[in-house]
Each structure stands twice: as C-alpha cells, then as structure tokens.
Image: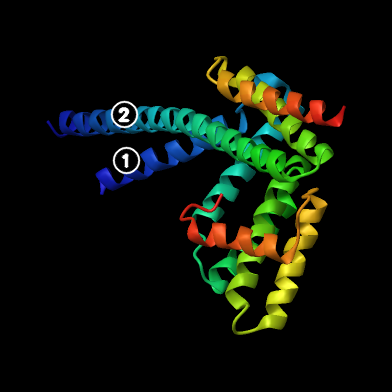
C-alpha cells in the first residue's frame, strides 16, 4: 500500500516537473517572439525619427547619411520579419533621399 | 513546498529558454549581421527606455546624460548620431533650466549642445535656435 502511494507521489511529481517545463518553454517562446518584434519596431521608429530630424535640420551629407542608415536598417528588418509592412517608411525614406539628391544638384 | 519548486523550475525554464532564443535572434542574416542587428535593437530599446524617464529637471536630465554616455559606449557606431542628438537636446534643456540661476553653467551646457549639433551637420546652432529647441523639448511630454 505504501509502495503504491509512493509511486503515485513520484508520478504526480514527475508530471508536475514536465508540466512546469513545458509551460516555461511556451512562455519563453511567446515572450521572445513578442520582444523581437517590439524591439524591431522600436529601432525602426528611432531611426525614422532621427532621419526626419536630420533631413529637416542638417546639411545634405549628414541628412543623406541618416536616411541611408534608416534604409539599410529597414532592409534588414524586412528580411527578418519577411513582410512588407514597412512600405510606408521606405517610401518616406526614398522620397527624402531623392529630395536631398535634388538639392545637391 | 512542491508548488514553490515547480514555480522556480517554471521561472528558470523561461529565463534559460528566453536567453537561448534571444542569442539566436536574426541568426539567418549570418553571424556578423545578426550580432550587429541584435546590438542595434538592444541599444535602441535602452535609448527609448532612457528617453521615457526624462523629466524637466536638471537632475533628471543629468541622469539621462550619464545613462546615454553608458549606452553610447556600448552602442554600434551607426547609432552614435542618434544618441548624440538626444544628448544635444538634453544639454539644450539643461542650459534653459539653468539660465536664471547659473548663467555660466547654462552657457557651458549650451556650448556642448552646439558642438554636438554641429558635429551632426545642423545648419542653425545659434543661441536662439538652442533656446527654441530646448523650449520645444521642455513643452513636449514625450522626449524624442
């Protein structure tokens, strides 16, 4: 009888350990995916804001540098996220770049 | 007690798996590009958190300047300009806040702001432009 109770306790403990491990793994995967996309969004916003301010206030060389940095970052983000949700930002960036080049002529 | 142990196991699993997955973020870009992008996004996140906590006081701004200096020392070169712009704005605000009490200190902060903005290629770095930049920043809740 004691042996059966021991067995049940060990079984419950084993199930608990596996269950906690699975839950932990699922939470980490979910958090990691969420954080990855929010960090990408954050870096994209930072680069976009910087490019806009440099475009408004800086000379052509520095403005171009900021816009090119934003474009290269957007390209990397697009490769990572594999979607085209950044089309609007690309449009803004290339428009700014075109205007900078136009001014330099 | 058993429930406590299970909770500890859960938390440790979350931490270990998260760290493992985070170290592999963007890995299909190639080792070097992935590491650089990871560094870039983490710096941008630290920069955003730092900016969110700025208040319109000299002490808070000084704290942010210190925090930015630390972030900058570990940041990829591509982000230096972004951090320098934030620093310049902080110095411009500090100059504005100190103007009444300590004009000498205010002038030195203003000069630091001008130097940083000049290095970023800003065309207008007059005292009036610095004051306007500072006022805009001071009146804005979100410091961006």
* Foreground of the two, A7 or B89: B89
User: On residue B6, which mark appears?
Assistant: 1
Q: Residue furthest right?
A: A105
Percent x, y of residue A50:
66, 41
Pick the quarter of the image with the C terminus of chain A: top right
In the displayed structure, would residue B103 be above or below residue B124?
below
Which colour assignment does the render follow?
Answer: rainbow
Quadrant in the rendering for residue B103 = bottom right
* Chain assignment, label 1: B
Residue under the image location 70 percent in, 23 percent down: A94
Percent x, y of residue A83:
54, 15
* Foreground of the two, A89 or A80: A89
* Foreground of the two, A8 or B54: B54
* Chain assignment, label 2: A
Marks 2 and 1, how far apart in space?
9 Å
* Foreground of the two, B126 or B90: B126
User: On residue A19, which mark appears?
Assistant: 2
- The crowd level at tag 1 (other Cα within 10 Å; few <14, some 14-19, many 20+) is some
Quadrant in the rendering for residue B70 = bottom right
Pick the quarter of the image with the N terminus of chain A: top left
Percent x, y of residue B29:
69, 21
Residue under the image location 63 percent in, 22 percent down: A90
């Amino acid at each position: 009888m004691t042996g059966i109770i021991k067995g049940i306790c060990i079984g419950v403990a084993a199930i608990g350990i596996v269950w906690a491990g699975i839950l932990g793994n699922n939470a980490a995967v979910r958090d990691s995916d969420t954080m990855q996309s929010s960090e990408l969004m954050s870096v994209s916003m930072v680069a976009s804001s910087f490019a806009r301010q440099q475009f408004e206030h800086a000379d052509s060389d520095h403005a171009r540098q900021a816009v090119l940095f934003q474009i290269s970052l957007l390209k990397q983000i697009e490769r990572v996220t594999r979607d085209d949700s950044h089309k609007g930002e690309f449009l803004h960036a290339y428009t700014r770049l075109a205007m900078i080049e136009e001014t330099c002529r | 007690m058993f429930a406590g142990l299970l909770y500890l196991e859960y938390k440790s699993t979350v931490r270990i798996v998260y760290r493992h997955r985070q170290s592999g973020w963007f890995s299909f870009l190639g080792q070097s590009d992935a590491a650089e992008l990871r560094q870039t996004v983490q710096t941008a996140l630290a920069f955003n958190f730092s900016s969110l906590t700025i208040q319109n006081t000299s002490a808070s701004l000084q704290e942010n300047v210190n925090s930015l200096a630390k972030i900058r020392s570990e940041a990829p070169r591509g982000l230096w300009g972004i951090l320098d712009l934030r620093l310049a704005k902080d110095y411009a605000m500090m100059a504005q806040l100190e103007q009444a009490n300590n004009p000498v200190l205010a002038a030195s902060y203003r000069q630091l702001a001008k130097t940083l903005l000049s290095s970023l290629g800003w065309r207008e770095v007059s005292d009036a432009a610095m004051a306007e930049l500072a006022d805009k920043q001071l009146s804005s809740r979100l410091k961006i």
